[in-house]
Image (spheres, rainbow, N blue to C red):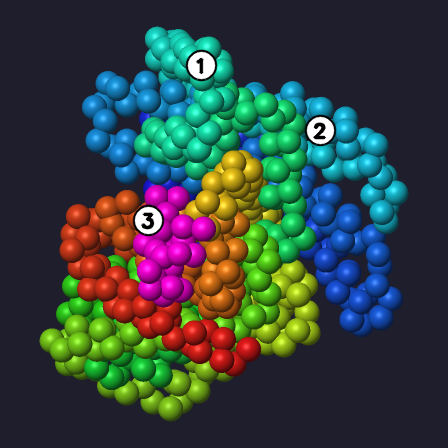
């Protein structure tokens, strides 16, 4: 099991089925191209910031050039993620399948991925042809140069996926998997006239049933959404497949999403330079001597470090190794430490620059500045709830040999951590104050972190920096492909008219807006368990936010409830992926930690109900 940056958790298929091949000879040109594109995107955006705010001479073509480079980066990054096996998937249920059947299931999952990619290549080529007649406004070039990235990416991914399937599966399992897919496709085609008469009944068949089965088989989430939507459109509608490609393109191409790979890169820089560790050491010198002090340090460090990296996984990987040894010495049980680590990371996900908030703002049309300002306060509410529980849990903590750190030590650690401590407040202040957009701030933050890292924390070597660029490209590609296919599925769902029917039903719920809030909490907790954060948001936000608006719920208040509920689900066993990532980072058995986490999740739920019931907590200061 491995972890990825930007709030996206990655769970690998067993190594005997599909080994990761970072640095493969066939992939190095793709990795090099993706790295160059990432540097180009950062450079273009930084040049835009300088020209706009320093020189007062905005360069009109920069956003357009960055958008073109961004789509190429996303598609090449997705191909690298396929090669490295870094696409998000759910593997909890694979372990329950008998060993002999598991090999076949893994072969089937790989071929489902290939099927999605091959089904999209022809309509994507048609889409590129249509884009030839559309000229970009600033650069005055055909948009097919941009759209070609989709075809190239799909072709690369299909070759890699088929290659993995051939290499990992026996001939018998491969043939059986091909036969299963062919038979299901034939049945879908033969029953197509019947599906056309079913109306809303096609939703549970394709957009729920097919997706759920593929999730259980371990198919990466992006391709679960892809196969469900392809089957829905092909067998139950007359919509041409080229429309699906357009929806995927639109889901990946919002200018707001340009900040996603840059904040992922920022998280990598944070890890490599040790800036996060400096913050943890300062917090430990300040609070480590009090009862439950190390628990407070863990929560406070997650809060502050999250404001730099924007990544739950990066947060946990930075904080846990620095604090767990001392916490064990004081008598904290490993399972309790994991429970606090997991729920603390969930709490910190609303702290800017949370990529979840950026994506939510993009999908739901909510102000990023307002989300960043509100998220900071909401995280404090959840931090307080967890701190109260941690203090109660620490009643038996051994304080033998624990002394208050001398002022000289506190001062020294403050000086060392000060450059890193400035960064989260710089990000929140710039975006929340309307000085710059999240995308612009992300480029400034990366430049700041690189310079400060070089001056105060040892810097980053060229070889390591290149590896960070490749890793950022892969993780960003995996994230953005999920956003694209989830957007396509959300579009298919809304086109059925189901969303309007759901809105009518939800609006008439007894109890009014608060009943709708309770339904929202339940829905996003479940989706957070199964789908992880970003796909759940992209899938449901277009449906749920208009209903919230009808009921008079402020969009920022509703966003805080959605994100918090989703994070609670993400950390909830036995399915929540974030829980298993925390166990892996802390080297504790999930079975051991499972019982310990429930009181902490309960504390977060209390905080969530408070946030839902009191809108002022989210919006009074906006």
- Residue that extends furthest to the left in the rendered view of this protein: 396
| Residue at 84% in and 59% down | 59
**Percent of width and height locating residue 234:** 54, 22
Q: Which circle's residue, 1 or 3, is located before the other in the chain? A: 1
Q: Which residue is nearer to you in this view: 136 or 210?
A: 210
Tell me: 236 left or right of 140: left
Q: Image quadrant of residue 173?
A: top left
- Few, some or many residues within 10 Å of mark 2 (<14, 14–19, 20+): many
Residue at x-position 38% and y-position 91%: 407
Vertical side of 458 occupied by 622: above or below: below
Separation of marks 1 and 3 at Cα, in angstroms: 32 Å
Residue 127 disc label? 2
Considering the numbered disc 3 on the image, is that residue within a helix, a strand or a loop? helix
Front position among marks 1 and 3: 1
SS for callout 1: loop
Q: Which residues are magenta?
A: 504-531
Q: Nearer the viewer, mark 1 or mark 2?
A: 1
In the rendered structure, the answer to whether residue 542 lies left or right of residue 328 reads right
The residues bearing labels 2 and 3 have C-alpha atoms spaced at a distance of 36 Å
| Marked residue nearer the N-terminal end (2 or 3) | 2
């Amino acid at each position: 099991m491995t972890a990825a940056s930007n709030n996206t958790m990655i769970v690998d298929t067993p190594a005997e089925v599909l080994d990761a091949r970072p640095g493969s000879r066939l992939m190095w040109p793709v990795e090099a191209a993706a790295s160059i594109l990432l540097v180009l995107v950062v450079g273009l955006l930084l040049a835009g910031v300088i020209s706009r705010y320093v020189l007062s001479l905005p360069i009109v073509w920069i956003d357009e050039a960055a958008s073109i480079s961004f789509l190429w980066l996303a598609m090449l990054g997705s191909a690298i993620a396929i090669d490295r096996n870094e696409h998000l998937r759910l593997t909890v249920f694979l372990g329950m399948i008998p060993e002999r059947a598991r090999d076949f299931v893994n072969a089937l999952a790989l071929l489902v991925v290939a099927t999605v990619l091959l089904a999209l290549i022809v309509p994507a080529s048609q889409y590129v042809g249509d884009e030839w007649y559309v000229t970009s406004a600033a650069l005055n070039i055909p948009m097919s140069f941009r759209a070609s990235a989709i075809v190239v990416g799909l072709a690369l991914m299909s070759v890699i996926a088929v290659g993995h399937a051939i290499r990992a599966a026996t001939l018998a399992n491969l043939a059986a998997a091909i036969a299963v897919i062919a038979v299901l496709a034939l049945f879908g085609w033969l029953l197509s006239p019947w599906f056309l008469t079913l109306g809303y009944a096609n939703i549970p068949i394709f957009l729920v049933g097919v997706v759920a089965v593929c999730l259980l088989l371990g198919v990466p989430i992006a391709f679960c959404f892809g196969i469900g939507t392809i089957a829905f459109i092909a067998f139950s509608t007359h919509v041409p497949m080229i429309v699906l490609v357009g929806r995927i393109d639109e889901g990946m191409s919002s200018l707001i999403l340009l900040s996603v790979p840059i904040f992922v890169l920022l998280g990598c820089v944070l890890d490599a330079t040790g800036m996060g560790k400096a913050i943890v050491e300062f917090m430990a010198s300040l609070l480590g001597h009090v009862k439950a002090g190390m628990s407070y340090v863990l929560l406070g460090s997650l809060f502050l470090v999250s404001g730099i990296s924007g990544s739950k996984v990066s947060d946990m990987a930075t904080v846990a190794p620095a604090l767990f040894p001392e916490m064990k010495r004081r008598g904290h049980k490993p399972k309790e430490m994991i429970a606090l680590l997991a729920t603390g990371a969930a709490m910190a996900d609303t702290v800017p620059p949370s990529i979840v908030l950026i994506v939510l703002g993009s999908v739901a049309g909510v102000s990023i500045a307002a989300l960043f300002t509100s998220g900071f306060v909401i995280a404090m509410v959840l931090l307080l709830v967890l701190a109260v529980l941690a203090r109660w849990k620490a009643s038996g903590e051994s304080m033998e040999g624990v002394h208050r750190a001398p002022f000289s030590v506190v001062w020294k650690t403050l000086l060392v951590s000060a450059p890193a401590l400035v960064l989260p407040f710089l990000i929140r202040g710039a975006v929340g104050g309307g000085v710059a957009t999240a995308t612009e701030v992300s480029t400034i933050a990366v430049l700041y972190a690189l310079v400060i890292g070089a001056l105060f924390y040892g810097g980053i070597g060229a070889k390591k920096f290149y590896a960070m660029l490749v890793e950022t490209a892969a993780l960003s590609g995996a994230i953005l492909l999920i956003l694209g296919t989830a957007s396509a599925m959300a579009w298919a769902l809304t086109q059925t008219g189901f969303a309007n029917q759901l809105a009518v039903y939800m609006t008439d719920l007894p109890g009014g807006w608060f009943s709708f809030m309770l339904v929202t909490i339940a829905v996003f907790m479940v989706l957070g368990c199964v789908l992880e954060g970003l796909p759940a948001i992209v899938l449901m936000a277009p449906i749920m936010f208009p209903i919230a608006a009808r009921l008079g719920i402020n969009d920022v208040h509703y966003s805080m409830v959605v994100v918090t509920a989703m994070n609670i689900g993400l950390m909830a066993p036995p399915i929540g992926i974030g829980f298993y990532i925390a166990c892996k980072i802390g080297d504790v058995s999930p079975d051991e930690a499972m019982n310990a986490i429930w009181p902490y999740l309960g504390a977060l739920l209390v905080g969530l109900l408070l946030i839902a019931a009191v809108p002022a907590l989210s919006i009074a200061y906006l």
